[in-house]
Amino acid sequence: MSDFLANVFPDEAAIPAAVNLPHFIEQREYLIDGKLKRWEGELNPVASPVFVKKGNAYEQKVIGSTPLLTSKEALEALDAAVKAYDQGHGEWPSMSVATRIEHIEKFLSKMREQRTLVVNLLMWEIGKSQKDSEKEFDRTCDYIVDTIDKLKELDRNSARFVQEQGIMAQIRRVPLGVALCMGPFNYPLNETFSTLFPALIMGNTVVFKPAKYGVLLVKPLLEAFRDCFPAGVINIIYGRGRETVGALMETGKIDVFAFIGTNKGANDLKRLHPKPHRLKAILGLDAKNPAIVLPDADIDNAVNECITGSLSFNGQRCTALKVLFVHKSIVDEFIRKFNAAVAKIKPGMPWDAGVGLTPLPEPGKTDYLKGLVEDAKAHGAKVVNENGGTVLNTFFYPAVLYPVNEKMKVYSEEQFGPIVPIVPFDTDDEPIHYVMNSHFGQQLSIFGKDSKRISKLIDSFASQVGRINLNTQCQRGPDTFPFSGRKDSAEGTLSVADALRVFSIRTLVAAKMNGENKEIIGSILNNRESSFLSTDYIF
Ligand code: G3H
């Protein structure tokens, strides 16, 4: 261990009281059919990525435990969701949009009351900096507010009748059924809730299983989930994915599968469903987003964007820049400036002011990253930044690798961590070839000024990825923009508006425009005889 990491982990006494968790959090509750049940079986310890110094040694903080439910409880949760949906006749799916919104708003106000605790748990469970944890919480609340607004807009638009070829129709969106929502550990609140709330607000009932890490942070919200929704509308389970979620898929009763994780995990689960044609999937999966830095790029801007693009939250973002193609003519200057910028990022604990690098939550992750560095070295790359790749417990100091080539694992494998592989290139065909041959197709970034050259790249990549960023890092936001991907990177498109579509289907009532039909429909509308066929809408 090099000395420069010696102070990265704190003494217990140095942890500020405001972020310290009050006590060991033993969670035994889970939510099924409107009841918080108590689990008496096996528990899963929650080990924080944070270690504390004890004299000359280090001790990993174990902050709590969560229930390891079995397939039995998972199936009970599913039964509750199926019952609450009741083939579309349940209280929730048949409720008016305005009343459903009231339930969501009630939840949102209770959720806001838990901000401090949820933010602290984000820091302790996944090592996200305080600033980014607060951003994740606030962005999630904003997402819910925007979702409500979009639903009102959708409701207004669907209230009108259309007339085409002598047929009049009213087209409305209705829920699909039971949704299974699962999110990733890097955005355990935001990414999970960005499918969970659209699913709920459209009238589906839900089984929600929190991410692998970032599980305890759902606990402060359990009572709000119980109190703000009718029984069975939202059911929250915990445990090993295979055992719990696998059992759910095998029943064939899941109608929508919302999953942010690996394409392997998604494939394994999807193929368990006995009637795949009935399963609608919305998936956010692996990515290996490249940056392409052209010879005329504004190097300072490219460096700044590539630094946040590759290293914010230690590179643990699905949208992170995971390989940098830099033109040979500028690569030396780029690396010099990039390394200088890396050296300025502050390592430390999530609550330290100005921190930019923090410990990693996945067990075994630093060994995996070390392996990638060793493999790259064996094929001719060097770690070119000072202290690059230094490890202490769960902390991995960023390694900038150069020159990277196709023989190295890190050239094509998604590192999902603080390694920055730099590939020098001569002709634009080299990065084009890389993107065309990649299994992934989420996003990429182009840095340069020559509009003709950039246009050629844009046209080559438009059929390969979901978003092309110009002189800007890759990212999901703003959340109103479509977030999609090609190949093994995604299925379906998410955005505030798209998510409402994903969790619903258009159903219409259509009739030939003759006097009799006009009279029947007029009577239904005027007397408010149907809740579907109605011109009422909310402001
Ligand atoms: O991990 C993947 C997230 O969707 C990335 O979102 O680009 O806002 O960090 P972000």
Image: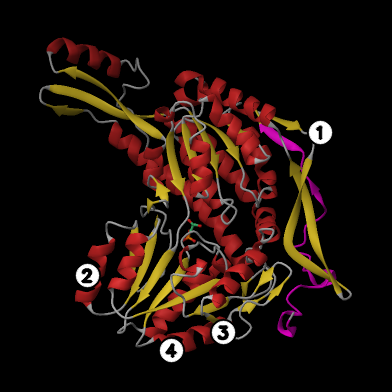
Going from the N terminus, do you reach mark 3 or mark 1 first? 1
Residue farthest to the top? Answer: 516
Q: On the picture, is 179 further left or further right than 280? A: right
| Residues at circles 2 and 1 in contact by the CB criterion of under 8 Å | no
Q: What element does badge 1 sit on?
A: loop
Q: Magenta region: which residues?
A: 2-31
User: Magenta segment, principal secondary structure?
Assistant: loop
Q: Is residue 33 visible?
A: no
C-alpha gap between disc 4 and disc 2: 26 Å
Residue 283 percent across, percent down from the top left: 45, 45
| Residues at circles 4 and 2 in contact by the CB criterion of under 8 Å | no
Q: What element does badge 2 sit on?
A: helix
Going from the N terminus, do you reach mark 1 or mark 4 first? 1
Residue 466 percent across, percent down from the top left: 34, 56
Going from the N terminus, do you reach mark 4 or mark 2 first? 4
C-alpha gap between disc 3 and disc 1: 50 Å
For disc 1, the neighbor class at 10 Å (few under 14, some 14 to 19, many from 20) is few
Quadrant showing the N terminus: bottom right
Label 3 CB sits under 8 Å from any ligand 1 atom: no
Query: Residue 469, located in which quarter of the rendered image?
Result: bottom left
C-alpha gap between disc 1 and disc 4: 60 Å
Q: Nearer the viewer, mark 2 or mark 3?
A: 3
Which residue is identified by label 3? 385
Which residue is identified by label 2? 455
Q: Is residue 120 above or below residue 270?
A: below
Which residue is identified by label 1? 40
What amino acid type should be assigned to the residue bearing mark 3? Asn
What amino acid type should be assigned to the residue bearing mark 2? Ser
Q: Nearer the viewer, mark 3 or mark 1?
A: 3
Viewer-side residue, 142 vs 456: 456
Which residue is identified by label 4? 332
